[in-house]
Amino acid sequence: MDLGIDGKVAIVTGGSDGIGLATAQRLAQEGARVVIAARRQSVLERAAAQIVAAGGHAHAVVADVTRPADVERLVAATIERFANIDIVINNAGTSSAKPFEEVSDQAWGEDLDLKLFGAIRTTRAALPHLRRSRGRVVNITTPGGKQPGAGSLPTSVSRAAGIALTKAMSKDLAPYGILVNTVCVGLIKSGQHARGAVARGVSLDDHYRALGSGVPLGRVGEAAEVASVIAFLVSNAASYVTGTSINVDGGSSGVV
């Protein structure tokens, strides 16, 4: 199916690996021109090179979404390179999950700054261009933002804020034809999981097998599976979808 994103310009934050890289790769496969942003230059440039080697258009911009100047520079570099912005994927973030009494003020602030304010800054900086293109915004959150569990802070709260931000933005930006949605991501294979397996001295296969045993579909998801949902949301096929959340979690969440 032609998704209708050939020639579109997309910014993907947290685009150097995991879901961000898989999304950038999928959008590039569909003909989009992709700008990926992350903090680690060597990893970021390697990711961009992979996309280009596969025949896609990609540009790497080292940027930290907790720094307003970096976000402004990211948007400026995108316009300088590709002259437009049609799509923003707010993916930057890490897992941070502890019991309430173990989360310091600093940890609360850092998590909200990265996951919530990172999405706010990036979308706001890109907004003049998104208005002209009647663009799309996808915020990456988690089902834990809808159904927090024990020991899930501060992530569950910052993700709940991201879900609320998505709904509010969808209302405010609808008059400009901008569609805003969130993908709530469950257990997905990632470098973070791989590093955790090494730290615990277990094989990655055993680690994923143990995690997958608690998922209704019986396995941990692939980043490419999330990327496919994101690609749909920014496509012509989703032209009447805004202000919604989609769980990509193998059926794990108890809420829709």
Image (cartoon, rainbow, N blue to C red):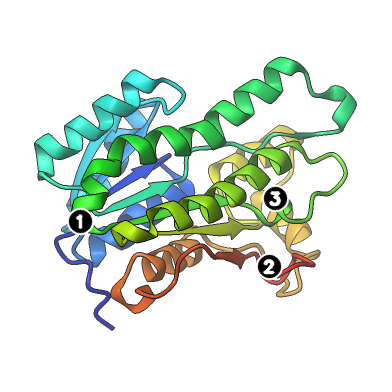
Nearest to the eye among marks 3 and 1: give it.
Answer: 1
Q: In which quarter of the image is the N terminus?
A: bottom left
Q: Nearer the viewer, residue 176 or 243?
A: 176
* Residue 54 position by quadrant: bottom left
Q: Which of marks 1 and 2 is nearer the N terminus?
A: 1
Tell me the number on the disc at residue 145: 3
Residue receiving disc 1: 133
Instruction: Identify residue type, mark 3.
Output: Gly
Q: Nearer the viewer, residue 84 or 95?
A: 84
Identify the secondary structure beneath mark 1. Answer: helix
Q: Which of 151 and 52 is in front in this view?
A: 151
Residue receiving disc 2: 219
In the rendering, at what x and y percent does residue 244 appear? 54, 65
Q: Which of marks 3 and 1 is nearer the N terminus?
A: 1
* Residue 220 position by quadrant: bottom right
In the rendering, at what x and y percent does residue 251 appear? 71, 72
Nearest to the eye among marks 1 and 2: give it.
Answer: 1
| Mark 1 vs mark 2, CA separation in Å | 39 Å
Q: In this view, does 185 lie to the left or right of 30?
A: right
